[in-house]
Amino acid sequence: MVIPVISKTVFRKYVIVVALILLTMVSTLNGRGKARPLSQFAGFQTHTSSASDDIFQQIRQQVTAMEYPAATADNLVSMVSRWKTPRGQSVLPILQRILFRSQEACKEGHISRTQLAQTEEKVVAGLCQSIKSEIAYKRNYFDLETIIGYRHANCFGYAQLLCILGNSIGLTVSAMNVSSEHVANIVELSDGTMTVVDLIRSNNFLSERIITDSEFEGEGSRWTYKDKNHITQENKTIHILDHNELIGEIYFCRGTMQYMSGRGAEAIEHYDKAIERRPQCARAYNNRGGARLILSDHADAIADFNKAIELDPTYVSAYHNRANAYLDTEEYAKAIVDYTRAIELNPQFAKAYFGRGFAHLSLGHYDEAINDYTQAIQLNPTYARAYYTRAIGYAQLGERAEAVHDMMQAITLDQTLRNDVEKLCAEFDLNLKLN
C-alpha cells in the first residue's frame, strides 16, 4: 500500500478532524452520547473493513493470551464492533487510522514527536470515552466475560479493557498497580513521556504528561512519584505489570471472589495460579493463607503468612491473619506478638486489639484483655462482640456491674449474641433478666 505524503497544512486540518472525531465518539448500544454527523468522517471510510478484521484478530489474540477462553474473545469483539461514530462507522479502525497517519507524518518529518504524542493522547482519550460510554463502574466486576455480559467493570476490569483495545489499535498500554487495591494504566508516548489513565475517575482520567527521570524515583517497573499531588492518590507508588503479572492479577481476583464466598478449596486453586505467575506477590500468599484457614489447614496457612511477611515486612493483614491462625491453634503468646506488630503498624486496627484481647483473656490476663477490648470499642463503638468479651473479663475479675452493662450493650448492638449472653450470665451467676 502506498502512503501519500501529508503536507503540514493538510496535517493541521487533519488534526482538527481528529479532535472532532474524538469528541463525538458514542456507543450505539446505550445512546449515552449525542452528536451531529460530521462530513469529515467520509475520508476514513476506505480500508475500514480490512482494518476492522485486523483489529478484531488482535483483540482475540490478546484476550486468549490472558488465558480467557476463545468465546470470551469473540464476545468482546462483538461488543466493540458495535461502537460507532454518529455516521455509523466503526470507532476502533478510525482511531487506528489516526495513529497510523500521524506516525507516517512524523516519519516524513511533517510533525514532531511531541505533536505525534499529542495525537496519541487524543486517541487515548477517544478510546477511554468509548469504554466509559459503554461500561459503568462497579466494584467487583473484573472478569471480561462478566464485564461484557453486565456492562460493568471495576478498576482492574477497565485496565484490562484499555490494555487489550489500546494495544490492538497501535498504542503502547500497560496495566499497573498504584496500590494493593487499585489498578490503572500507563501509556507510553512517542516523545518518551507517558500518561497515566485511571478510568474510575469521573472526568480528567488522563494525567498530565509525565517524564520518568524528573518525576519518578526508582527504576525498572517499580517507581515512586516525586510529586505527591499526582493524579494517583493512593501511595504515589506504581508497579507496571508485565504479561505474566497481569495474568496473575486475574487469577488473584478470581481467588479473592471465591475466598469472599467462603469457598476455600476453589480459592486456593486460583491463588496457586496467581503465585505461579507472580511469585513475589505478598497479597496472593496472604489470601491463600486465609483460604487455608477456612479449611482449618493451619500449618500451611501459617507458612503462607510467613512468606507474605518475608516479601513485605510491613504487611499488616499478614501479621493479623497469622495471629488469628495462632489463636486457633491456642498458641496465644505467639498470637499476642503478631497482634502487637499489627497494632504498631496500624494503631487504628480495632480487630487487632480485639484479637489480642482474646489471647490475653485465654491466658488469664484479664486486665490486659479489658484494656484491649476498651481500645477496640473506642475505635469502633458498635463493636458488639468486643463488649461481650470485655464482659467476660469483668466477670472473671468479679466486677459484676461492669459485666452486666457490657452484656446489655452487646445485645443492644447485636441480637444474635442473646443466647451467648444468657449462658454467660448463668455461668457467672449474674442477676441479669432479659425480656
Image (spheres, rainbow, N blue to C red):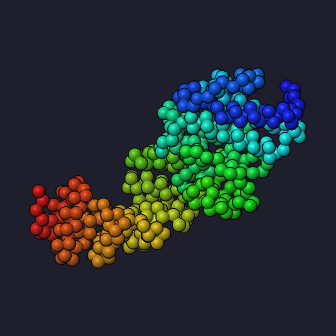
Rendered position, 346 above or below 163: below
Rendered position, 30 above or below 346: above
Image x and y of residue 362, in percent: 29, 71
Tell me which corner region of the image, top left, top right, bottom left or bottom right, holds residue 297. bottom left
Q: Which of the pair 287/39 is nearer the observer?
A: 39
Q: Which of the pair 380/396 is nearer the observer?
A: 380
Q: Which of the pair 202/274 is nearer the observer?
A: 202
Name the image quarter holding the C terminus.
Answer: bottom left
Image x and y of residue 167, in percent: 69, 39
Name the image quarter holding the N terminus.
Answer: top right
Rendered position, 282 above or below 277: below
Residue 222 in view: yes
Residue at 47% across, 62% down: 318
Image x and y of residue 198, in percent: 60, 47
Residue at 70% across, 38% down: 123
In the displayed structure image, the side of residue 66 where residue 46 appears, left or right: right
